Image: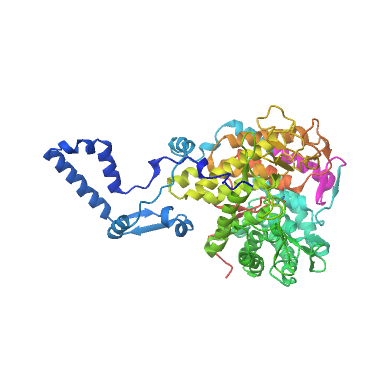
Amino acid sequence: MSKTLPYSMKDVHYDNAKFRQRSFLKVISQTLVNSNMKRDCAKCSMGKFLVLLLFCGLGYLMLTHTSTTHSVFGGQEKDSNRLKVGDELITDGTSRLRRFLRKPPRLPPRLSPDEIGNVNKSVHVPGKLNTGSKWIDRQHSVKKAFSHAWSGYKNHAMGFDELMPLSQRGMDGLGGLGATVVDALDTAMIMGLDEVVSEAGSWVETHLPERINQKGQVNLFETTIRILGGLLSAYHLSGGEQGGNQTHKGPEPIIYLENARSLADRLLTAFTSSPTAIPFSDVILRDQSAQPAPGGLSSTSEVSTLQLEFNYLSFLTGDSKYSMESMKVLEHMKTLPKVKGLVPIYISPQSGEFSGDTIRLGSRGDSYYEYLIKVWLQNKASNWTYLYEMYDEAMKGVKHLLVQKSIPNGLLFVGELPYGPKGSFSPKMDHLVCFLPGTLALGATKGITKEEAIKRNLLTLEDLENLKLAEDLVKTCFEMYSVTSTGLAPEIAYFNIEGNSEGGLDGGNKSSEYVNDISIKYADRHNLLRPETVESLFVLYRITEDPKYREWGWEIFEAFEKYTKVDSGGYSSLDDVTVIPPHKRDKMETFFLGETLKYLYLLFGDSSLIPLDEFVFNTEAHPFPIQRTNKRE
Ligand code: DMJ
């Protein structure tokens, strides 16, 4: 494994002083230098000397003048300031002068040439992103796709977890709680599809309570992110928090909250029956009991991807038990040994320790990293700074240990350490890892636009580095689609690196610039309609406002339309994305309606719809409002 940083500041050319917060004295001295005062000083006349004196006097007055300034991140204040986004400091003139005299000059967040271009454009006009009928039309196409997916499900599989679009029937792969109904519900609300909301909502009201009481084994994580998460966001979006002022068709919002609570009361047994803070992986709903997965271990990502949902439920009900139990997991994980913030993908509910050495941001690891920053963002009022610190350290670990560049054309990617930090590096990247660009961008600006964050001087150099990494990685994720014949990504890609070419097929699109950088193994050629890349495109678009992310999203959407649409209703997974026509697989995952189409719809729509500084999306794309106050106590 290369010891040099594959991704480092050498790739970021920040060299623009334009946005520095400069001291007034510096402004004056630089003005003098720029106007050749230095060169002319030798022959300085008395008049010029007086002008110089005047400038100095003015400078002193400005320095000592009392004023309100925004806190600034950077230099020595970086760590303590990082957590104070938006705070304002009142400084008095004397202390300001003292600071100026004592401290070395604070490093400004410098800007790359690209950034200079962006920032120099005219001031951001709200809504300017969303003009143009092209995007309205494209957003409408996504809505039509959702209706087509829903109609297939409704006609052939209503009440089952998933649609089998080819055989036109349903299957229960997630425990039988009607997962597609609940996963799709808030997407329909966001799209304003009243009829779907009404159909899905009535099903929840009529059937879900009984299912929750009577069904058997369910996975704690899947049930939390899809069902509990879907119910909670439906409650919010239907106006539940406005005291029954219903904003959508369907049942009274309280129905969603009651179901959420009844389900969560059962899911809690996974926590309470474990001998440690780490919950068991499965719950038997009708028995209200829990059990470990076969083999005894839980996935790291699964036990650490429950907190947004349980916290929000505590907030809504005023009952702290949900939040308390789920947060014990993260509080415990804080104490465990890590490798530069990175963690193994298994953990034991029996011992509470990590198990094995495998480190990756793909399956079983992914949303651990996502929830560290999102739970912190959701609960700023709780001051859980340890979460931000864990996230920050982990992202440094990612950059040092997992990010490399492919050959011959230099795509940045996130690989794996299957045998821990002392073992060899694997250039394997699951499509699941493509959540990371979005998470990195969100962690950098905390949901506001990059332009706004720069204007308010809120970004540390680390934030800018993470944002740059996010932009590079989302390009790689997009290229994982572009290199294939179908324009759809495989489940797993391998990147060719110096001294390690894994072998495998190329994607089949010979005209792609990166066809020699990416290999696909025979067993990994399938596509499950996953959302991670369009999720990151959506977040990157909202944050950078760069229209290329919308164009990339549109290309992906068109490929889904072309190759996965089933005439009789629904969309199918594919067996092989490298051949045309691809063989269809008889399954439509619930997250195609819950996540993939929702993110595409939001990507093409107005940025005031579910703003990223006011909502946090759970890992299944269910948006919860960010809590400004904490009702847990
Ligand atoms: C979803 O259930 C969630 O996004 C989860 O975090 C990862 N896997 C699927 C989508 O690919």
Quadrant where the C terminus sits is: bottom right
The reply, left or right, for residue 156 in relation to residue 412 is right
Percent from the top left, x then y, of residue 570?
79, 40
At horizontal 57% and vertical 46% (from top left) the residue drawn is 4
Percent from the top left, x then y, of residue 18?
38, 41
Q: Does the magenta stretch include residue 146?
A: yes
In this view, the residue in front, 139 or 389, is 389
The reply, left or right, for residue 617 in relation to residue 146 is left
The reply, left or right, for residue 588 in relation to residue 277 is right
Percent from the top left, x then y, of residue 183?
72, 51
In this view, the residue in front, 90 or 312, is 90
In this view, the residue in front, 269 or 241, is 269
Q: Quadrant of residue 293?
A: bottom right
At horizontal 41% and vertical 40% (from top left) the residue drawn is 16
In magenta, the rendered stretch is 143-167
Q: Which residue lies furthest to the top in this view?
A: 511
At horizontal 52% and vertical 64% (from top left) the residue drawn is 383
Q: Is residue 109 magenta?
A: no
Magenta-drawn stretch, dominant element (helix, strand or loop): helix
Percent from the top left, x then y, of residue 307?
65, 61
Q: Is residue 191 visible?
A: no
Q: Is residue 16 visible?
A: yes
